[in-house]
Image (cartoon, rainbow, N blue to C red):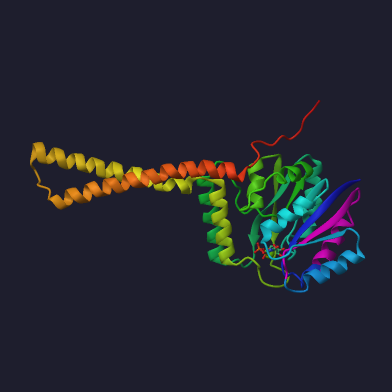
Amino acid sequence: MKKVSILVPVYNEGDNLFTFFNEVTKVTSQIANYEFEYVFVDDGSRDNSVKILEDLASKNKKVIVLELSRNFGKEIALTAGIDSLKTDAVIIMDADLQHPPKYIPEFIKHWEDGFEIVATQRVSIQKQPLFRKLGSYFFYKILNFISEFQTVPQTTDFRLLDKIVIEALKEFRERNRMVRGLIDWMGFKKTFIPFEAPERFAGEARYSYSKLVRLAVNSMTSFSLFPLRLAGYFGILISTVFGCLFIFMVLNSLFLHITVFSALSYVIVINSFLIGIVLSCLGLIALYIGHIYIEVIDRPLYIVRKKKN
Ligand code: UDP
Ligand code: MG
């Protein structure tokens, strides 16, 4: 019998865990032919989450609890969970019931059809602040503009991954990570199902704006070297403009005598030209740093799906 793991990062979700577990098991108990296990990663919760999880685990052998020593953030909690898996597929879910368990059968159906990743795309979310909607919109626009592969907007971590994707993910050891982004980077056979995200069952969203901004900056800088090259582009622009201006001024005073330029204007133009040169050099250094960065994060060069003979 194939095994499907449900992976849930948990940070102060004491008020949600019972309901969450009941709702999930209600759905999974209807699905025959698969063995389910429930992996909860406690990300340093300060409420009664751990106690509830331990209770669940002592009553149900299919519940596995991984308790992190402190709060490392959702991305790392997910990574810890994925590293621990020995399974045929995993379904990643939030503990706050914003990822409705009723989609689990659909995930499995697409997986049986041969998709290695079944991801979800949010079609609507009730009462999300306008500022957050706009932020998310521009984040994807910019990310797709500067990075070499396309990220689909409004996708979430609520997804099913086949065993081969799980094994491939274990090879990624970079520290600043967005698991979703890494999965998109990998390729594989992928499909999307639209879903409506309800509001959080209990409690407040655990992602503060500052955490979201950090995540956005992280994902932009780890999937694109464009921000690094900006200084260089800027420098080339400045030195070209001021270089041309300088040549124009010299030619003008030597041959045309239309305008007379003061000594100060020469100083300013030459100085700006030199600033441009300095910025271009910074851009050049950034290119080398970019190479070092790529070597250091040590992503796998390629991922093999299957091998025959
Ligand atoms: N979470 C976590 N560590 C954190 C923050 C959140 O493990 O530092 C978990 C949280 O318990 C929940 C999921 O990540 O299961 C999504 O968190 P949240 O609902 O706050 O985020 P949002 O729904 O706003 O994306
Ligand atoms: Mg949530």
The quarter of the picture showing ligand 1:
bottom right
Residue for point 42% across, 47% down = 230
Residue at the limit of the structure toward the top, as seen here: 309
Quadrant housing the N terminus: top right
| Front residue (pair 1, 27) | 1
Horizontal and vertical percent for residue 276?
32, 46
In this picture, residue 307 sits left or right of residue 218: right
Q: Which residues are magenta?
A: 18-45
- Residue 293 at least partly seen: yes
Q: Is residue 259 magenta?
A: no
Residue at the limit of the structure toward the left, as seen here: 257
In this picture, residue 76 sits left or right of residue 237: right
Quadrant housing the C terminus: top right
Horizontal and vertical percent for residue 20?
80, 65
Q: Quadrant of residue 102?
A: bottom right
Q: Is residue 41 magenta?
A: yes
Q: Quadrant of residue 57?
A: bottom right
Note whether 255 is above or below 146 in the view shown. Answer: above
Residue for point 10% across, 38% down = 254
